[in-house]
Image: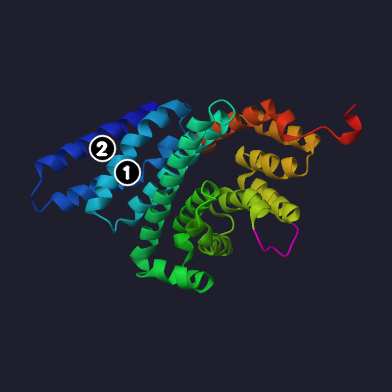
Amino acid sequence: MLQSYHRQVWQLLACSCLLALFAGCSVKKMAIRQVGNAFAGTGTSFASDNDPELIREALPFSLKLMDSLLAEIPDHQPLLLATSSAYAQYAYAFLQMDADRLEDLDFRQSQALRKRAANLFVRARDYGLQGLEVDHSGFAVLLRADPKSAVLNLRKEQVPLMYWTAAAWAGAVNLSKENPYLIAEIPQLEALMDQALVLDPVWNDGAIHSFMITYAMARQGMNSDPVEESKKHFEKALECSRGQQVAPYVSYAESVAVQEQDMELFESLLSQALSIDTDEYLQYRLVNIIMQKRARWLLERKDDLILPPLDAID
């Protein structure tokens, strides 16, 4: 797998050299699109990697090269999707999660990481919206004006862009609760994610349901019980992923079990998360390793997150 990754890197570097050779020539745009196509397909090798630190170090180079490519080919929809996804995942896995772990040790550094993560989430959102604009010119303006109506024009094949745009948007909102402009945009991200769920509820082995596990607990104006909604999405996420993903267990533990102050449920969920063999399901290996790291961290903090019952306190 690492050989595959290294081969892709050399291919991309070779293509980058070709761009320099062809600068000013009519073939430049074609060469750039070839590099864009190559970068749009790198997600699979990253997903199966077993070394998160290697990916942490590799991604910044990839992200900046993607930025440069999109400055030349701003309508390359597959690359826009890949870039939106990559920025969102980098912001969460390597900035926000680090910030969470640092909060009690170095609050200032934790806040600095959260600020960086929020900025990259916004960048991911903007690339996602740009991708949706390729097929729907003026979509961002329509989304601001009437979110629920605007998303009705989107199609099933656009669900990946809808998901990453909305997920990144939610990440930015979560880290910027003092920003009234982002808070006011919540109806837009909710319309995108709701419509994505309607169009393709099983997309990416239940990724939308996994997102909704946590989001249901924070969503405003719901007519139903948030815990019940979260539970429904948790069960659907497990069904779609065949129990092979760590994230649903961690999300349900971190949101519902903590909210309900249920230590038994909390420990059971995280135990199940840690029991998953990360080498058995290669398509989820990287994210499963990262989420198991979070599961261990949550277990270390269980007595801070869930208080003992009153009758157990002397």
> Residue 197: x percent and y percent?
58, 60
Give the percent coordinates (x, y) of residue 77. Answer: 34, 57
Examine the image and state in which quarter residue 161 appears: bottom left
Q: Is residue 102 above or below residue 152?
A: above
193 lies left or right of 25: right
Left or right of 309 on screen, residue 191: left
User: Percent from the top left, x then y, of residue 168?
Assistant: 48, 50
Could you tell me which secondary element the residue under label 2 belongs to? helix
Are discs 1 and 2 less than 8 Å apart at CB?
yes
Which mark, by number, is residue 39? Answer: 1
State the SS at label 1: helix
* 221 magenta-colored: yes
Where residue 213 appears, as percent x and y from the top left, is 65, 49
Q: Which residue is mark 2?
A: 12
Main secondary structure type of the part rendered in magenta: loop
User: The N terminus lies in which quarter of the figure?
Assistant: top left
Which residue is pictured at 76% across the width and 35% down the height?
306
Mark 1 is surrounded, within 10 Å at the Cα level, by few (under 14), some (14 to 19) or many (20 or more) other residues, namely many
Answer left or right for 57 relative to 154. left
Amino acid tagged 1: Phe
Residue 200, numbered circle:
none
The correct choice, above or below, for 126 with respect to 283 in the image is below
- Mark 2 Cα within 10 Å, few/some/many (few <14, many 20+)? some
The answer to whether residue 101 is visible is yes
Q: Compared with residue 10, is residue 179 higher up or lower down, i.e. above or below? A: below
Magenta stretch: give its range. 220-225
Residue 282 seen in the figure: no
